[in-house]
Image (cartoon, helix red, strand yellow):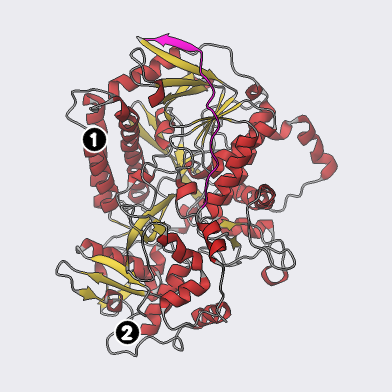
Amino acid sequence: MAQTIPQDILDALTDIDMPRLGAEPEIASKIDVQGHRVPVHACGVVIVGSGAAGLRAAVELKRRGCDVAVISQSAWGGTSACSGSDKQTLHTANTADRGDNFREMARAMRAGGAMDEDMAYIEAVGSVRAMASLQFLGLPLPQDSLGGTLRYRTDHDEAGRATSCGPRTSRLMVKVLATEAIRLGIDFFNQTTGVRVLVEGQGDRRAVSGILAVRPRSQAPDNPYGLTLFHAPALVIAAGGPGELYRDSVFPNGCFGGLGLALEAGVDLVNLTESQFGIGTRREGFPWNLSGTYVQAMPYVYSVDAEGNEHNFLADYYRSTQELVSNLFRKGYQWPFHATRMLDFGSSLVDLAITRENQAGRRVFMDFNRNPAPVPGDLPFSLDRLDADVAAYLGKAGARQRLPIDRLHHMNPLSVELYLRYKVDIRRDPLEFAVNNQHMNGGIAVDTWGRSSLPGLYAIGEAAGTHGVTRPGGAALNAGQVLGTRVAEHIAAGGRARTPPDGRVGEPLEQALGQIERVLRAGSALNIRAIRDEVQARMSDHAGILCTPQDVATALQAAGKLNRTIRDTGISFLRGGEIARVLQWQQMALVSEAVLAALHHYIDQGGGSRGARAICDPAGEAEPMARSGPLSDVRFRKERVADQAGQILVRLVDGQFQITTRPNRSLDETAKPFFERDWPAWLTGAVFDLDRRAVPDV
């Protein structure tokens, strides 16, 4: 029976209005440094980023009596508020049909390797608390008639741990957390871009002392760059991932993340080789991941060449119509590209085919008003000829309507409404899409409390490199909530964030200002458009889903040359409003080189294909097959199992990237907590390990 959901309900879950920020606090204090009169806001802790992870940390810190300030380039304008984060992965509470336990969930999270076992367990245990507190704040996660959470299967998830409020799940999370943050009176500084972490001390005594930001409203004749200093003993980077790193990206425009900030502060980054790529609409229009029901509706996928001719190109890869449409369906819960799924006519052969069409200059579309065209010589599409898992799913969903648009509207009417909001009517028009970069699984190296290798600096959300190789879909949203809470607990336990610091920061501020002035050179021949075009093209063309050792090595050399040019000549700017972007693109160029340096190291040491990328090599052990025969040009190396046990660390030292490795942190699954023995550590605060200044082994 067709389900009819009233339009007002669809509207409420699609058009998510965000709360209005209150009046911004006045910044009365100023400091004179090298001819600049810089406003100074002192506080206990600064959070960089106003997404779901950052807001969670802000709320939890404020509840614990800490003096908190949130700075944001654009409040409610980041990935979790604007992009396609449509699910949260959580512990399934030992329900009879999907039995689960925290250790089993942790094993699923870290199954792809390069993830710390203790962090996976922390995320599993913390998911219950994260979900319950979000529900308390008003997040409308769906329930059955007996109060159980409705769940479904997602990528890298066999137990069915995902739940969803629809395509705007992460935006709804931001909304309820933002509403609570405003209610608590947390200080927000919008249109404020952090550009340099301030570090005091030397050697083992290094520690955070704040962050220097660019604020257009602070620009004045005696402050031409619009600088503002946020002076604090604790800094939480929650600015998301480096979405601007790739040309082919599903990130909203302007997502630079915080990895460049961390690199310049000498902080260790980890797992930069690990990202996620998958099909989605292009960022030039409305960027969105085409996972879940978009492909489970089984639309017709085709390409168009320069002369306007249509090509049923997937039929060149699959042996039968049934095999083609069943693997298209599986992209719903096998959305990220994975090299091994190109084998045996698997679902990632779809990603490969799309990539090759784009490389040939063809545009790729999906049409929800046409069923898939048949493979030549085979029978036409039929709902009665599907692989068993596909047929069973559609049968349970009641999605046996004649056309894809009807199947989609039946399973997920919100998916249709979402595109309508952006003037794209998939009920009428085909949807252009491509294989895009979607998530950085690596990031700032942190310990179990979110501490980085620089004392006082923490990282959460996509900025933290905790996700490993094949995290389940929705696990990143959960990770940000869990670690955001733990970071708040740790900072509050230290006591320093309850009141603003009263010391001066003259030397660190002078150093940061000197770094900025070496970049900002009005007469330079290098501008941000040239840097953007070069970085994005290099990363999309040479560090996407298909890589070769030679391409990566050449790309790394070119990235190093660009950064040397920036150091030598700086970057030009035409007006004050470009200053923040200039500094962000200077940092993005560094991040690009860091990613390529880690990837080159991994490949050069014999690393194989895993997670995001196929390492193509004529001597590789694996060769995908198409209907027409072997695809020898994408023969690839298989992953070495031993590589799953370790992680690659990157640190910037005197303009050079240092690469080291470390084993994953382990978890003794036989160890059991004991109340009387372990309670004192909680009561005294020993559990927070506050005496350790540095965290060298993160």
The residue under label 1 is 562
Q: Nearer the viewer, mark 2 or mark 1?
A: 2
| Quadrant (top left/top right/bottom left/bottom right) for the N terminus | bottom right
Looking at the image, residue 125 sits to the left or right of residue 36; the answer is right
Which residue lies at the image location 69% right of the left edge and 29% below the top edge? 493
Q: Dot 1 lies on which element? A: helix
| 108 in relation to 666, above or below | below
Give 168 or 561, whichever is nearer the viewer.
Answer: 168
Query: How far across and how far down the image is residue 110, in percent?
Result: 55, 55
Within-10-Å neighbours for mark 1: few <14, some 14–19, many 20+: many
Q: Earlier in the sequence, mark 2 or mark 1?
A: 2
Residue sitting farthest toward the left: 307
- The question of residue 24 being in magenta is answered with yes
Q: Main secondary structure of the magenta part?
A: loop
Q: Position of residue 408 (x, y in %)?
A: 46, 72
Left or right, residue 94 beside residue 28? right
Closest to the observer: 591 or 63?
63
- Residue drawn at x 51%, y 14% as measured from the top left: 28
Q: Is residue 398 above or below residue 560?
A: below
Dot 2: element:
loop
Q: Specify the segment rendered in magenta.
A: 16-34
Looking at numbered disc 1 in the image, what kind of residue is underneath it? Leu
Dot label at residue 696: none
User: Which residue is tagged 2?
Assistant: 374
